[in-house]
Image (cartoon, rainbow, N blue to C red):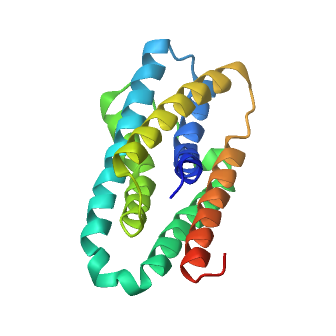
Amino acid sequence: MTFLEIFLIAIGLSMDCFAVSVSFGTSRRLLWKDLFRMGLFFGFFQGMMTLAGWWVGDTLKPLIESFDHWVAFSILSIIGIRMIIESFKHEHERKSVDIRKFTILLTLSVATSIDALMTGVSLGFIRVNIIESVILISSITFIVTLIGGKVGEKATFIPARRAELIGGIVLIMIGAKILLEHMSII
């Protein structure tokens, strides 16, 4: 898997975190320490869940090697479709909570990184430098979270839903590329 593909996966995975940080930025003024804390939590959990998922996928690889490309495609597509569906939910359907509370931050960090866990499983089925991937996913998520918080703070209406929509589409496209490569179509 190329650097660009991992970069696009990182961007796609970070869109949940971006949407959360934008919504918190629009609802209350966050201090830089709050944004850094949120970015560190989100980045750490995205990376660690990717690593945990990769370990599971790499362990299962010998058992499903003949159809691993279908599994990777299915997982990335399901995550992408879920993100696309979430992007169409109305803002009033999302709950307002205080990100500065440790339990809220921890819960949101785990919730936004479930996609990373499943993506990590799919990465375990293909050739990838997992350490480089985890560092990139964590770093991109950290940066995107900071940007989302500041962007949300500056605007009264930000289409965070569009970011989630685009992230979902990117994950589906990468899954399709993996499938097509293994079927020797591209």
Q: Position of residue 29 (x, y in %)?
A: 57, 16
Residue at position x 61%, y 32% in the image = 22
Q: Is residue 174 left or right of residue 108?
A: right
Along the line of sight, which residue is nearer the eye, 76 or 99?
A: 76
Circle count: 0
Residue 71, by quadrant, is: bottom left
Residue 65, by quadrant, is: bottom left
Along the line of sight, which residue is nearer the eye, 40 or 128?
A: 128
Residue at position x 57%, y 68% in the image = 175
Residue furthest to the left = 59
Residue at position x 37%, y 33% in the image = 41
The reply to whether residue 49 is in sight is yes
Q: Is residue 19 left or right of residue 158?
A: left
Along the line of sight, which residue is nearer the eye, 178 or 81?
A: 178
Residue at position x 35%, y 27% in the image = 101
The reply to whether residue 46 is in sight is no
Q: Position of residue 92 (x, y in %)?
A: 64, 45
Q: Position of residue 176 (x, y in %)?
A: 62, 72
- Which image quadrant: the C terminus? bottom right
Residue furthest to the bottom = 66
Q: Is residue 85 left or right of residue 135?
A: right
Q: Position of residue 43 (x, y in %)?
A: 41, 36
**In the rendered view, would you say 163 is above or below 35?**
below
Along the line of sight, which residue is nearer the eye, 50 or 4?
A: 4
**In the rendered view, would you say 79 is above or below 167?**
below
**In the rendered view, would you say 111 is above or below 157?**
below
